[in-house]
């Protein structure tokens, strides 16, 4: 699996924990690494390498979350943010941040977000995530 795809998966996992536990993002990142390091062979603790791309995605998404959430709500008809499934909400946050702030081409970001939705959510989520991100993309291009 390409490194950036794995970093996005890890970023989603950290954002999900941050969102659900309402903890500081640095604690969520530390807990993620702690979980990875405890999954060494034969359940022996192993060292988890730092994932700089994942950390930059997570920190940036959280720093801009209020602004990102407004963009998501504006493009998700009849859905309040707090009523969205947590996985979908955080896939959208991650993708909107990456499109707007990292400069990754929108087509790549949307494709990666759809893969995350397929892997961690369901078929209905794929269509929902695609619709919202396409609307955000069109709005950004206008």
Image: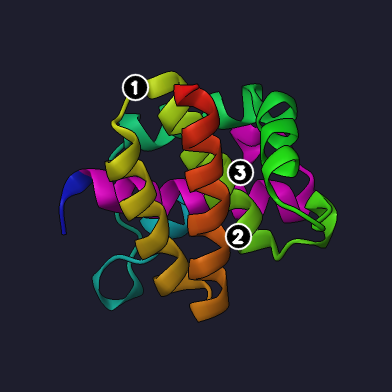
Q: How is the image coloured?
A: rainbow
Q: Is 18 colored magenta in this rendering?
A: yes
Q: Can you see residue 137? A: yes
The stretch in magenta equals 4-29
In this rendering, the answer to whether 6 lies above or below 127 is: above
Of marks 3 and 2, which one's residue comes earlier in the chain? 3
Tell me the chief SS of the magenta region: helix
Q: Residue at x 30, y 56 (%)?
A: 46
Residue ranking furthest to the left: 2
Q: Residue at x 35, y 63 (%)?
A: 115
- Give the number of the disc on residue 88: 2
Disc nearest the viewer among 3 and 2: 2
Measure the C-alpha gap from mark 3 to mark 2. 18 Å
Q: Nearer the viewer, residue 10 or 48?
A: 10
**What is the quadrant of residue 9 in the picture?**
bottom left
Q: Which residue is mark 1?
A: 103
């Amino acid at each position: 699996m390409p490194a950036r795809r794995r970093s996005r998966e890890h970023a989603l996992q950290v954002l999900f924990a941050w969102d659900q536990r309402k903890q500081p993002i640095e604690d969520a990142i530390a807990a993620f690494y702690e979980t990875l390091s405890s999954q060494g062979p034969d359940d022996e603790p192993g060292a988890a390498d730092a994932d700089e791309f994942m950390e930059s995605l997570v920190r940036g998404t959280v720093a801009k979350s209020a602004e990102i959430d407004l963009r998501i709500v504006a493009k998700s008809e009849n859905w309040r943010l707090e009523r969205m499934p947590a996985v979908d909400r955080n896939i959208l946050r991650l993708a909107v941040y990456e499109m707007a702030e990292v400069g990754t081409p929108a087509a790549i970001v949307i494709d990666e977000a759809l893969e995350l939705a397929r892997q961690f959510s369901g078929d209905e989520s794929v269509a929902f995530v695609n619709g919202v991100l396409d609307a955000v993309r069109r709005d950004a291009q206008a």
